[in-house]
Image (cartoon, helix red, strand yellow):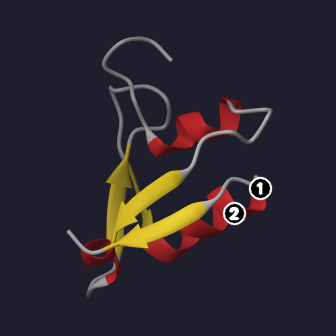
Amino acid sequence: LVPGAVSPFGILNDSEHKVHFFIDADFFEEPGLIGVHPNDNTATIWLKTEDLVAIVKEHENQVTVVHL
């Protein structure tokens, strides 16, 4: 990723599945949506938080929901 384009989707570049993904539990509260950059900070994609977590898990990275 280029500087400034950090995105949860960057984890898909982790071919060795070493990155542990942490997400705040508040993102699951209604409406349960999260806006993320599609590895380019000139656009935003809105998706359900549970779908983002499913993508990360499908990629075989660990996910931990935290309460901040």
Residue 51 x/y as whole percent: 56, 70
Above or below 2: residue 31: below
Residue 6 x/y as whole percent: 39, 29
Residue 49 x/y as whole percent: 44, 71
Above or below 51: residue 29: below
Type of residue at label 1?
Answer: Glu
SS at mark 2 in the image: helix
Q: Examine the rendering and report whether any part of residue 52 can be seen.
A: no
Residue at the top extreme of this rendering: 2
Of residues 41 and 10, the one drawn nearer to the viewer in this rendering: 10
Q: Examine the rendering and report whether any part of residue 1 can be seen.
A: yes
What residue is rendered at 34% in x and 79% in y?
32
Image mark for residue 28: none
Task: Choose top left, top right, bottom left or bottom right for residue 42.
Answer: top left
Q: Is residue 42 left or right of residue 57?
A: left
Image mark for residue 60: 1
Type of residue at label 2?
Answer: Lys
What residue is rendered at 36% in x and 12% in y?
3
SS at mark 1 in the image: loop
Residue at the left extreme of this rendering: 68
Above or below 12: residue 61: below
Q: Residues within 10 Å of mark 1 (few under 14, many from 20)?
A: some
Q: Is residue 56 left or right of residue 31?
A: right
**Residue receiving disc 2:** 57
What residue is rendered at 27% in x and 85% in y?
29
| CB contact under 8 Å: marks 1 and 2 | yes
